[in-house]
Amino acid sequence: MLKGALLASITVMAFAVAGAAEGAITVLGGALAKDCSDAAIRGDDDPRFQEACTLALETELLNPRDRAGTFVNRGVLKLRRAAYSDATQDFDAAVRLQPEMGEAYVNRGAASIGRKRYADGLRDINRSIELGVSEPEKAYYNRALAHEGLDDPKSAYFDYQKALEIAPDWAAPREQLTRFSVSRR
């Protein structure tokens, strides 16, 4: 965190909202739910995979965790197509089914960031960090985006740093950090 007065002033070169990071859920349910899960994990955004998710939700017998995970995965596919409102509906459904599923909150937060609702995004992302997520670096990265949207570059800087600390090979937070200038007062 902050080391005394050493990092007293943090300025950002330019704020441009980068794409939020999303987290998919591994679902072991029926074949369609697994196809949906695999597509979300792979990073696909083809609408036919979204349809597989919908069919899985309509036709497959899924336990509550896999059902919620399928809503999250379909929401992730919608996020990739910038269908933020539709994605939010899926994340809301996942939260109703499994209120302790951190990935539903981090992704709903990402959708809020996409809609420029930074305070809502921050609230959900903080909840996801409390609950725990499989890829916490994405939660910190998204929280940094929310902080930037709320004109809090100092908090954004530290969250990008945390994301990079967790995933040192991930280029996205490293690239964002190049926009910051840190100086002593």
Image (cartoon, rainbow, N blue to C red):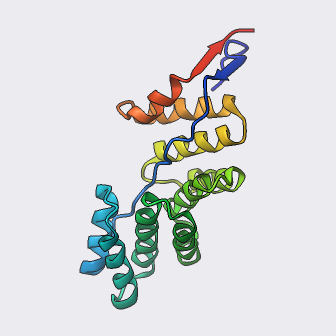
124 vs 48, nearest the viewer? 48
Q: Residue furthest top?
A: 185
Residue 180, position as x, y percentages in the image:
59, 22
Above or below residue 142? Residue 10 is above
Above or below residue 116? Residue 168 is above
The residue that appears at 65% across and 52% down in the rendered structure is: 116
Residue 167, position as x, y percentages in the image:
40, 35
User: Which of the 4 image quadrants contains residue 69?
Assistant: bottom left
Above or below residue 11? Residue 72 is below
Quarter of the image that includes the N terminus: top right
Residue 108, position as x, y percentages in the image:
57, 61
The residue that appears at 47% across and 33% down in the rendered structure is: 173
Above or below residue 103? Residue 175 is above
The residue that appears at 51% across and 41% down in the rendered structure is: 18
Quarter of the image that includes the C terminus: top right
Query: In the displayed structure, does residue 54 sit left or right of residue 150?
Result: left
69 vs 65, nearest the viewer? 69
The residue that appears at 45% across and 73% down in the rendered structure is: 71
User: Which of the 4 image quadrants contains residue 99?
Assistant: bottom right
Residue 48, position as x, y percentages in the image:
30, 73
41 vs 78, nearest the viewer? 78
